[in-house]
Amino acid sequence: MATYTAEQLSGAGTPIEALTAGVSYVFALSAPANNSASAAYFTVEQAGLTFDSSAPTNAVGTYSSFSGAESLITSSYKSSVVVDARNTSPGTYQFTPAENIAASSSFLRATGNLSLSITV
C-alpha cells in the first residue's frame, strides 16, 4: 500500500491506488508538529466530471473505526472527513469498498498540510 505526502495531496491531489472490493483499508492521516492549520479536510473524489450511471461509485462501501476523523460526508462518488490538524496523528478510519476501485479512478486531496498512509 502507499504513503502520500502533503505536497501530493494538495491542490488537484493525486490519483488513488487500486483497492479491492471487500478488503478493509486503513486511511491514516498525519500532520507535522506545530502545524499552523487547525481544521483540515481529506477528500477522495471520483476523477472527471461525469456523475451519471456510467461513472464508478468508488465512495460506496463501509466506513468504520473512526479515530479523530469527524464529520464524514459521502455520496456515491466522494467521501470527505474533517480532522484537527494541530495533532500529529489527526485521524484514522477504515474503508471497505463495495466494488473494486481502479487505479487513478479517484483523486486523493487534503488541506492543512496532511499526509496519508493507506494500509490493509
Image: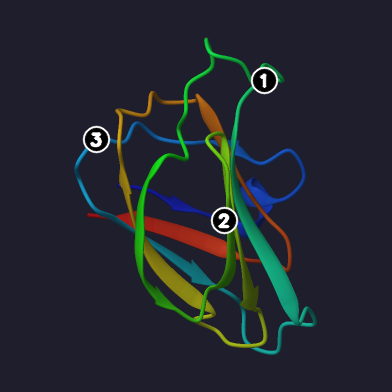
The amino acid sitting under disc 1 is Gly
Q: Nearer the viewer, residue 40 or 117?
A: 40
Nearest to the eye among marks 2 and 1: give it: 1
Q: Which residue is disc 2 drawn over?
A: 5
Q: Earlier in the sequence, mark 3 or mark 1?
A: 3
Q: CA distance from mark 2 to mark 3?
A: 25 Å
The residue nearer to you, when weighing 50 against 102, is 50
Q: Colour mode?
A: rainbow
Q: What residue is disc 1 on?
A: 48
Vertical placement of 83 versus 62: above or below?
below
Q: Of helix, strand and loop, which one carries label 2? A: loop
Q: Earlier in the sequence, mark 2 or mark 3?
A: 2
Quickly name the residue at label 3: 21
Q: Are marks 3 and 1 in contact (CB under 8 Å)?
A: no
* Residue 25 drawn at (x, y percent): 29, 53
Give the CA distance from mark 2 to mark 1.
22 Å
**Label 3 element class:** loop
Q: Is residue 53 above or below residue 80?
A: above
Looking at the rendered structure, the secondary structure element under dot 1 is loop
Tell me what residue is drawn at x 24 percent, y 34 percent. 20
Locate the C terminus and report the quarter of the image it occupies: bottom left
Query: Residue 35 appears at what percent x and percent y?
Result: 72, 82
Q: How far from the left and from the top, in percent, is residue 30?
A: 52, 72
Going by the numbered disc 2, the residue's amino acid type is Thr
Q: Amino acid at mark 3?
A: Ala
Answer whether labels 2 and 3 touch (C-beta < 8 Å): no
Residue 63, picture quadrant? bottom left
